[in-house]
Structures are given as structure tokens and as C-alpha cells.
Amino acid sequence: MKTRIKELRARHDMTQEDLARKVGVRRETIVYLEKGKYNPSLKMAHDVAVALKSTIDEVFIFD
């Protein structure tokens, strides 16, 4: 799965650490999400989208 997390983080001037704190995960989890190496639970996907002021569909690109 591809994501737009990095792009959306930049738009909100947010670091990986900032996003991780808002979502309640470790920074490494954000790294894996950005690289498409981790498929989040629905709750985590929702939390990431809310933190980035977006929808799940805007953040995650389902192939």
C-alpha cells in the first residue's frame, strides 16, 4: 500500500516524531507506514488521517 503521509506531513510542517506523538505510536511505525512496509489497523489509519486533517482515502492509496 502506498501513502501520502510524507507529503501531508510536509504540508502541515510536521515531523515524523510529531505525527507519532499525535497518533500514539513510535516514530519507527510512521517510517514503516511511509515506506509502505506496514499495513495499519483501521483505527490507526483513522488516527493518522485525523492527525493530518485528511480522510483515510486521501492518506492511503489502495492498490
Image (cartoon, grey):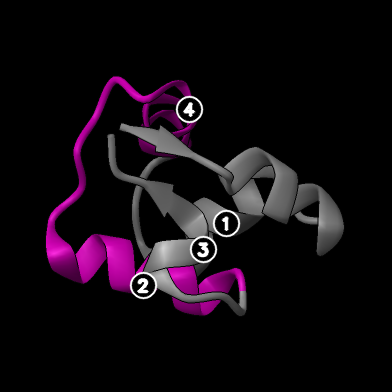
Q: Nearer the viewer, mark 4 or mark 3?
A: 3
Dot 1 corresponds to which residue? 19
Dot 3 corresponds to which residue? 58
Which label's residue is closer to the chain start, 2 or 1?
Answer: 1
Q: Secondary structure at mark 2?
A: helix
Which label's residue is closer to the chain start, 3 or 1?
Answer: 1
Three-letter amino acid code of the residue under disc 1: Leu
User: In x, y percent, where is residue 44?
Assistant: 25, 62
Total numbered labels placed on residues in the image: 4
> Which residue occupies 30% across, 32% down?
1
User: In x, y percent, where is residue 34?
Assistant: 49, 31
> Which residue occupies 31% across, 73% down?
46
Is residue 13 at least partly visible in the picture?
Answer: no
Q: CA distance from mark 3 to mark 1?
A: 16 Å
Three-letter amino acid code of the residue under disc 4: Val
Q: Which mark is residue 31?
A: 4
Vertical comparison of 38 with 7: above or below: above
Residue positioned most to the front: 63
> Which residue occupies 24% across, 29% down?
38
Three-letter amino acid code of the residue under disc 2: Asp
Q: Which mark is residue 47?
A: 2
In magenta segment, residue 47: yes
Q: Secondary structure at mark 1?
A: helix
Q: CA distance from mark 2 to mark 4?
A: 16 Å
Q: Secondary structure at mark 3?
A: helix
User: In x, y percent, where is residue 26?
Assistant: 38, 42
Q: Nearer the viewer, mark 2 or mark 1?
A: 2
Is residue 59 at least partly visible in the picture?
Answer: yes
In magenta segment, residue 43: yes
Instruction: Categorize mark 4 by other alpha carbons within 10 Å: few (<14), some (14-19), many (20+).
Output: some
Q: Are marks 4 and 3 in contact (CB under 8 Å)?
A: no
